[in-house]
Amino acid sequence: MYQSNKSILNPKKIYGVILSAGLSGRMKKFKPLAEYKGKTFIYNIILKLSSVCDKIIVVTGFKGEDLKNRIIGDLSVDDQAEMIKKLLFVQNENYKKGMFTSLQTGLAGAKECHWILYHFVDQPGLPEKFYPDFINEIDDNYNWIQPVNKEQKGHPILIQKELFGLILEATDNSNLREISNNPKVKKKFWECGYEEIFQDIDTEEDYQMLD
């Protein structure tokens, strides 16, 4: 049974935003429903985010209804009622235009939070301890917090609400790298020691090498 310790960690309202809308074109299976340690990628991430986030926005696209039904079906009887209150599914009708449109779709449903924890669906292997450690790095002197390991940048990223407008007003062919170069972005890099921040499962070969 999941337990939230979010209120102990940080009083800010934090929403998780998981991008799971793509076609998974380079893998032989639908990436969000690929398995890692007995659970799907998406379910692994939801369970870990549930302890640090007030809500979890799942951005769907390709096979969106199938994905939603599978996630709800995977919830245990004990957790189902509480977790359904936390989960918000939003469908990106423009998912074929790329990842940035999915981020924009997720942000449109995140108006009541102070921060989002922006998460890719192909990072199921981040340890549970990473998430409270990451949340504790929130600092209102910054609006973008990113983990690094040996000076290399990784994911997920914490993005403060004051940047939402910048992202939502950008054209759908923009990307987050362009946004990050805007002078309004005040970055904090957290040297975290977690090599899993580089996890990027795009191909069948990547999946076979996953621990």
Image: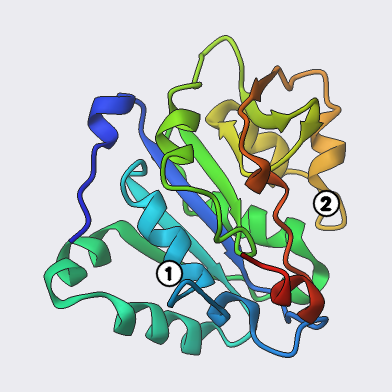
- Residue 25 image position (x, y, % from top left): 80, 83
Q: Is residue 94 visible?
A: no
Q: Which residue is mark 1?
A: 43
Q: Characterize the local packing of mark 1: few (<14), some (14-19) or many (20 or more) Cα atoms within 10 angstroms.
A: many
How far, Cα to Cα, is label 1 from label 2? 31 Å
Q: Which residue is mark 2?
A: 171
1 or 2: tag closer to the N-terminus? 1
Which residue type does callout 1 highlight?
Answer: Tyr
Which residue type does callout 2 highlight?
Answer: Thr
Q: Which mark is residue 30?
A: none
Mark 1 or 2: in front is 1
User: Is 24 situated left or right of 21 in this image?
Assistant: right
Q: Nearer the viewer, residue 185 or 8?
A: 8
Count of all numbered marks drawn on residues in the image:
2
- Residue 114 image position (x, y, % from top left): 44, 31
- Residue 90 image position (x, y, % from top left): 50, 68
The correct choice, above or below, for 144 with respect to 140 in the image is below
Q: Nearer the viewer, residue 21 or 189?
A: 189
- Residue 159 image position (x, y, % from top left): 59, 33
Secondary structure of the residue carrying tag 1 is: helix
